[in-house]
Amino acid sequence: MTVERNRRKVRIGRVVSDRMEKTVVVSIERLVKHPVYGRYVRRRAKFKVHDEQNSCRVGDLIRFMETRPMSKDKRWRFVEFVERAK
């Protein structure tokens, strides 16, 4: 049981929405090379993250961790701030 807890995925992303109660939407962008044209294309993944204190604001860079399902879409929880928005 304790071994499983140590293998939780941790991600870093930018908060794009904080309009929900105790939930923020976090986006992670990555550059992927297009298979045919060779040009780099932006790929975006969005995650709903549980934020118990409602402390995250739009533009914050945060670290979040995988956790048990908390709702239909929410499977991540806020860990710490990497950088606060200006």
Image (spheres, grey):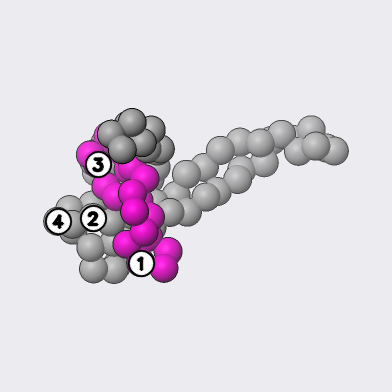
> Earlier along the polypeptide chain: callout 1 or callout 3?
1
Residue that sits furthest to the front in the current view: 1
Q: Amino acid at mark 1?
A: Ser
Q: Which mark is residue 53?
A: 4
| Residues at marks 2 and 4 touching, judged by CB atoms closer than 8 Å | yes
Left or right: 48 in relation to 19: right
Using the image as rendered, state which of residue 6 and residue 48 is in the foreground: 6
Residue beneath disc 1:
71
Residue beneath disc 3:
79
Up-down: is 2 above or below 24? above
Q: Is residue 79 visible?
A: yes
Q: Residues within 10 Å of mark 4 (few under 14, many from 20)?
A: few
Query: Could you tell me which quadrant the C terminus lies in?
Result: top left
Residue that sits furthest to the right in the current view: 36
Q: Nearer the viewer, mark 4 or mark 1?
A: 1
Q: Residues within 10 Å of mark 2 (few under 14, many from 20)?
A: some
> Earlier along the polypeptide chain: callout 1 or callout 2?
2
| Residues at marks 1 and 2 touching, judged by CB atoms closer than 8 Å | no
Q: CA distance from mark 2 to mark 4?
A: 6 Å
| Residues at marks 3 and 4 touching, judged by CB atoms closer than 8 Å | no
Using the image as rendered, state which of residue 2 and residue 70 is in the foreground: 2
Label 4: which secondary element: loop
Q: Amino acid at mark 3?
A: Val
**Residue 81: image location, x then y, percent:** 24, 39
Name the image quarter holding residue 5.
top left
Q: Which residues are magenta?
A: 63-82
Residue beneath disc 2:
51
Q: Amino acid at mark 2?
A: Asp
Q: CA distance from mark 3 to mark 4?
A: 11 Å
